[in-house]
Amino acid sequence: MLTLDKIYQAQYALKRVIRRTDLISAPNINKASQIYLKPENLQVTGSFKVRGACFKISQLSEEERAHGVIACSAGNHAQGVALAATAHGIKSLICLPDNAPISKVEATKSYRADVCLVEGVYDDAYKRALELRDAHNYTFIHPFDDEDVIAGQGTIGLELLEQLPEVEAVIVPIGGGGLISGVAYAVKNLNPRIKVYGVQASGAPSMLNAIEHGKIERLERVRTIADGIAVKEPGVHTFDYCQQYVDEIVSVTEDEISTAILALIEQHKLIAEGAGAVSVAAAMFNKVPIQGKKTICIVSGGNIDVTILSRVIGRGLQKSGRSCVMTIELVDKPGQLQHVSEIIASTGANVVSVHHERVSHTADINGCYLRLEMETRNIQQINEIRQLLTVHGYKIVEG
């Protein structure tokens, strides 16, 4: 049984292992609210997962330690288990999906764990881990559906109330549900007036669907840049805790996640992975009713591959109006490109790429397309450019 005593026990056990991450004021994330960030991306191993993994491993018997442990993960739980097992002198084997970011795979190896890459997503790695557990008598460390693991994650809830006793709402990422189960249990038992909101990626809404339909369901597929929460099926324990203690679960799009990652980089110099940024995305885009409330967004992890980060930044720039690609239909005659450039320059935007192409033989013989990539300030400036081009007789085909 999960109890407050167990969460307090976990807090004591983890005192010398984890960092107590400070709250960061984030006034520009949502100006209608008082937003604070809980930056678990700055935690040991770069994610909150180390809390649950370390507490679970600290509770193993001598016999279980002797056999070694096995875990499955999209990456963050893997590092937590690897770190904790090595610290206790225990052998660990981690099954990761083969599409896990390289940075997470290499980081797991750096903690001296053996790694088994499994074709597919988290759930496929989970199945393989159970097969290996049965074959070799390992102790399985579940990433979320284990009450010791949940208790470890619940230590974040205790910290939130100690750091901001007057908090009115907490926004938490959800994959399998271990983090929100622990946080919500701790928060609601100590102050039931505080609202707890969960956030999933729209491409992996397993817990959202389960709560809406009143039963655990398995998604046929998941697809999201938030690989840390790309879970097809929530846990039995976590589903029950979410039903009891979570006020609402919402989803955010890929563009919204990208925008949140960009905002954290620019405004707070914090690198968050997609899973870690969904709570901030929910606050930015008013997915939950937090207007006028003191709200904490848990930034659950920061282990994002740099190649993915560059693509995410590009997407975030487009979503926030900082970058724009526009295709304009022109008459192919001298001076057209110069005139278009002058119009754009008059607004203060900067053209960074130009592609000029004559149309096919089936269209106007004098027609052509001009594809421009621009650095812009915001959506308003993009709309101003569109309006000026239209006024001067240019037809915008795309953008």
Image (cartoon, rainbow, N blue to C red):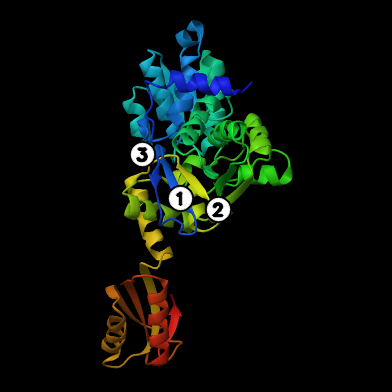
Residue at (56% x, 40% y) in the render: 231
Report the residue marked by disc 3: 102
Are dots 2 and 3 in contact, CB under 8 Å? Answer: no
Residue at (49% x, 21% y) in the render: 10
Task: Please tell me whether residue 251 is drawn above or below residue 398 in the rendered image.
Answer: above
Q: Position of residue 337 (x, y in %)?
A: 28, 86
Q: Position of residue 29 (x, y in %)?
A: 43, 55
Report the amino acid beneath label 3.
Ile
| Label 1 crowd (10 A; few <14 / some 14-19 / many >=20) | many
Residue at (40% x, 29% y) in the render: 79
Report the residue marked by disc 1: 35
Q: CA distance from mark 2 to mark 3?
A: 36 Å
Helix or strand or loop: what does disc 1 sit on?
Answer: strand
Mark linked to residue 173: none
| Label 3 crowd (10 A; few <14 / some 14-19 / many >=20) | some
Report the amino acid beneath label 1.
Ile
| Residue found at the far right of this picture | 214
Q: Position of residue 137 (x, y in %)?
A: 53, 13
Q: Which image quarter is the N terminus in?
A: top right
Are dots 2 and 1 in contact, CB under 8 Å? Answer: yes
Pick the residue in front: 356 or 79: 79
Pick the residue in front: 195 or 191: 191
